Amino acid sequence: MGVKKTTIYSLLVIGITAISSQIILIRELFTAFYGNELSFGFILALWLLGGAVGSGFLGSIFADKIDRKLPLFSAVQVLLSILIPSSIIFVRITRTLFGVGVGEIIGLPAFLANSGLALFPISLGLGFLFVLGCKIISESSSAVGIGRVYTLEAIGAMIGGTVTSLVLIRYFGALQIAFMLSFLNLLSAAFILPRQSAQNEKYLKTISLLLIFLLAVFAISGKIELMDKKSLEFKWAGFKVLKSTDSIYGRITVTEKDTQFNFFNNGLFLFSSHDPLSSEEAVHFSLIFCPDPKDVLLIGGGSTQIMQEILKYPVSTVDYVELDPLVISLSKEFLKNEPFYRLDDPRVNIINEDGRHFIQDTEKSYDAVIINLPNPYTAQINRFYTEEFFKEVKKILSENAVVSFSVGSSENYLSREQSLFLKTIFETARAEFQEVKIVPGDTAYFILANKKGVISLNPEDIIKRLEQRGIKTIYVRDYYLFSKLSDERIDYLYRAINQAGGVRKNMDFYPVSYFYDMVLWSTYFSFQLSKFFMFFTRKVLLCGTFFFFALLFIVFLTRRRTKNFRREATLLALGTTGLSEISFEILIVLAFQIIYGYLYYKIGIIITSFMFGLYLGSLYITRKLTTISRPYKTYTIVQVFVFIYPLILLLAFKVFASSPFGGVSRGLGANIFAVLPFIAGFVGGIQYPLANKICFGSSGAIGKTAGITYAVDLLGSFVGALLLSSFFVPIVGISTTCILLAGLNLVSLALLLAGVKRNSASP
């Protein structure tokens, strides 16, 4: 009997649901728990673990034993249609339910518990549906059906990733997108059942149609928008939510409390409408040392009182670079009537561009550059604190110019983690600039100059300069400066930095500062957790990795003469490929951010490129699967490409990072760069159906085979997502990580070759 069209539609919906729900839930968790790449690794790992359990445990055990598979498939889709929007609401209200206030960092156990409750049930159901779909769609007891399901899911994921990333998140909120996914799943649940159904199946169809009707009523009556608004208000308890909207760069939320406006980006605090202390420090600890600041470059944060403080100097122009135009439009909407508002001043030139790109392209020279960005909390922001960035900044400075930026610190006590974090930035800046001074405090201000003797942290000197220029300040004045810039505070700061130990310079493809900032982030959870991260030095991680490679090779090689060695070697290679595939995606995203900036809409192209390659690869091999007489040999040949690919990535990263792309050329380079995952997806798409044909010969059961192979693939991805962004990239760097991935796949290739040499009747 042929495959029903409704079944094909249902499998496409599973692919769409998997990628789209993953995107919106990860974004929600980020805004709820202030995530960086470490939390991203945990979130993605939990999602993949749920899929592995759903396929490897539930699917492999029950899929072959259940007689009425279509009703069960339908019932799980109905359940998913309820779970997805419920999870969005749960993420929004859980902080308030647990008594965690806005701006308060949640502990790691609570973070994992909340993320697991939101993600695990959905990914569990999707993993089970994949295996169940393999059993439903298979026309005979062969591995071809598994390949077809894999192909259909890849098509759905490609469609879902494209539409969600490029269209839906720009015009709709997460809850609205979640209800769209509910509609698709309910439609599938209703029509996948045959016309001639048993009584309980008719009830299931009726429930699906009734829920579709209720969903339509909710949408038409505006109840979904009301739920979205109420859940957001619950999330921001204690604040009045004026606006929360998505751009291609993230979600910007504007709140009000006690007549103060607060701006947040993806849940992270950006700025407040009234913060004169920070504004004065950010400006006057830099411009006061410029003899004649005519042209000033400001990167980030110009909607605050900072602009008012800059314009107290006789500047000719202030080039204000802000990546997200939404920040500017919302600032004009809510701050226009504030007394400090200066964005309409004719001397202010607003530029919506990545700050790094602007510096690379501009031919203008500046008397001062003020970088008003957060800590290197993510790998993307870290690129504004690297050796490469400081070299680029030097090229646009006038003779007596200064550069300033700030990072979080501590007023009276610096832990070793905090000292290491400050030291790596200090040493990186000092390698490029003749003079580097740090103003101590809860916020440490770094001031850089190309000439010695430009910067003076003597309080009397600063006060004198302010008086000579007639600049009035509230905080940066005599009573404040003598305490903040006392000899004792400055001596303690430099002593803590010098005694912290050896550090490496922070570089684009070796984000050391990002790692130390991540360690600081972990101290909010537990000092034991921070010690755990600090244990994994470069030497420890490399030695541990090489030991693991050797152990893996020896253990598997000792089983070379066993009957199931080929199947075991195939599953091992499938797991290492799963680890590598997710690692390739993360590496490409990180490298793309480092080279081209945080262009969120390009991430949609990256995801789509991978899924398109996965689709074409699985489609190509599935059509040829019945004619391949020696699948194990073919599988081994494919593994050669998995081994080579990370080395190709490393070469591509070096080429694109060193190429002088600018303007149109940069756009072309970014588009070419974004399709790099296509190759990885194509190879992975070929390998998975081949693995099923090899393993099917041993098991003889589609549900069990699909469940085990899919679980191995996802478990490999789970390990890759957990380890790559949390340890390998920040500790050993992107280049070394690529080489280690090649080494891991070389071990798998060597074991596969050992199986080829065996005289065996197995395929």
Image: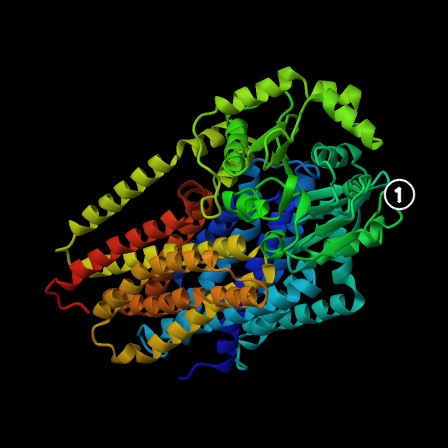
Q: Which amino acid type is shown beneath numbered disc 1? A: Pro
Q: Where does residue 464 sit, x and y in percent of width and height?
A: 78, 24
In this picture, residue 156 sits left or right of residue 137: right
User: Looking at the figure, which quarter contains the C terminus?
Assistant: bottom left
Q: Where does residue 676 sit, x and y in percent of width and height?
A: 44, 65
Quadrant in which residue 415 is drawn: top right
- In the rendered image, the residue lying farthest to the bottom is 1
Using a 10 Å C-alpha cutoff, classify the residue at mark 1 as few (fewer than 14 neighbours), some (14 to 19) or many (20 or more). Answer: few
Please name the residue shown 54% across and 28% down the image.
418
Please name the residue shown 46% across and 56% down the image.
658
In this picture, residue 287 sits left or right of residue 432: right
Q: Where does residue 136 sit, x and y in percent of width and height?
A: 42, 73
Q: Can residue 526 be seen in the rendering of this structure?
A: no
Q: Which residue is mark 1?
A: 339
Q: Where does residue 141 sit, x and y in percent of width and height?
A: 31, 74
- In the rendered image, the residue lying farthest to the top is 488
Quadrant in which residue 503 is drawn: top left
- In the rendered image, the residue lying farthest to the left is 759
How many numbered marks appear? 1
In this picture, residue 82 sits left or right of residue 648: right
Nearest to the observer: residue 377 or residue 701: 377
In this picture, residue 708 sits left or right of residue 416: left
Nearest to the observer: residue 609 or residue 174: 609
Q: Can residue 705 be seen in the rendering of this structure?
A: yes
Q: Secondary structure at mark 1?
A: loop
